[in-house]
Image (tube, grey):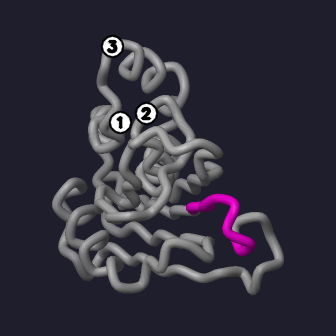
């Protein structure tokens, strides 16, 4: 059995003018928080996850595939993850580790909900999905509250 690892990253700034779009991170709704800019739901964690899965199988999904889906009215980033997963076989995800950098919103109270949601989407046990968060001590635009950065490492087993 071989092991492959994919690294994904994505970032979005907060909207400068409120559009009424909700903020979703890892598929979890953050009530009352400002939304992120983007032509989809701008779920920065899901987008980084798509890139990490693409890093395992080598098929670029975020961009060409997701832009076409978005233009067709599919703006739920969970659907983009499902598209990335279509290219994974015969490999199988075994673990995902996610890191968020932001000073707002406070994501700590929603980490377990994000883990549950991602585990269900990926078909993994919750213990194989990690989500951590930090502010970066305000050293970056994300730590200063201008947006959110997500980094994901996906580990897959290849028969």
The spot of residue 124 in percent (x, y) is 21, 66
Find disc 1 in the rendering and name its residue.
80
Q: Position of residue 90 (x, y in %)?
A: 28, 42
Residue at 30% x, 76% y: name it. 128
Q: Earlier in the sequence, mark 2 or mark 1?
A: 2
Q: Which residue is mark 2?
A: 40
Q: Which residues fall within the magenta stretch?
A: 143-150
Q: Residues within 10 Å of mark 2 (few under 14, many from 20)?
A: some
Residue placed under numbered mark 3 in the picture: 72
Helix, strand or loop at disc 2? loop
Mark 3 or 1: in front is: 3
Place of residue 115 in the rendered image (x, y in percent of width and height, measured from the top left): 29, 73
Q: Is residue 10 visible?
A: no
Give the CA separation, mark 2 to mark 1: 10 Å
Q: Kindly indicate whether the residue at mark 1 contacts the one at mark 2 (C-beta within 8 angstroms).
A: yes
Q: Secondary structure at mark 1?
A: helix
- Who is closer to the viewer here, 117 or 59? 117
Q: CA distance from mark 3 to mark 1?
A: 13 Å
Q: Callout 3: helix, strand or loop?
A: loop
**Label at residue 9:** none
Q: Name the residue at 30% across, 25% down.
A: 74
- In the rendered image, which quarter is residue 120 located in? bottom left
């Amino acid at each position: 059995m071989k092991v492959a690892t994919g690294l994904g990253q994505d970032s979005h700034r907060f909207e400068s003018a409120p559009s009424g779009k909700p903020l979703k991170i890892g598929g979890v709704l953050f009530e009352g928080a400002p939304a992120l800019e983007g032509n989809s739901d701008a779920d920065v964690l899901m987008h980084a996850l798509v890139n990490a899965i693409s890093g395992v199988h080598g098929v670029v999904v975020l961009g060409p595939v997701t832009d076409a889906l978005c233009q067709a009215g599919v703006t739920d980033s969970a659907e983009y993850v499902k598209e990335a997963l279509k290219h994974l076989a015969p490999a199988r995800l075994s673990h995902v580790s996610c890191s968020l950098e932001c000073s707002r919103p406070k994501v700590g109270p929603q980490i377990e909900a994000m883990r549950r949601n991602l585990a269900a989407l990926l078909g993994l046990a919750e213990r194989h999905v990690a989500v951590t968060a930090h502010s970066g001590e305000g050293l970056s635009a994300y730590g200063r509250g201008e947006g959110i950065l997500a980094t994901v490492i996906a580990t897959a087993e290849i028969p």
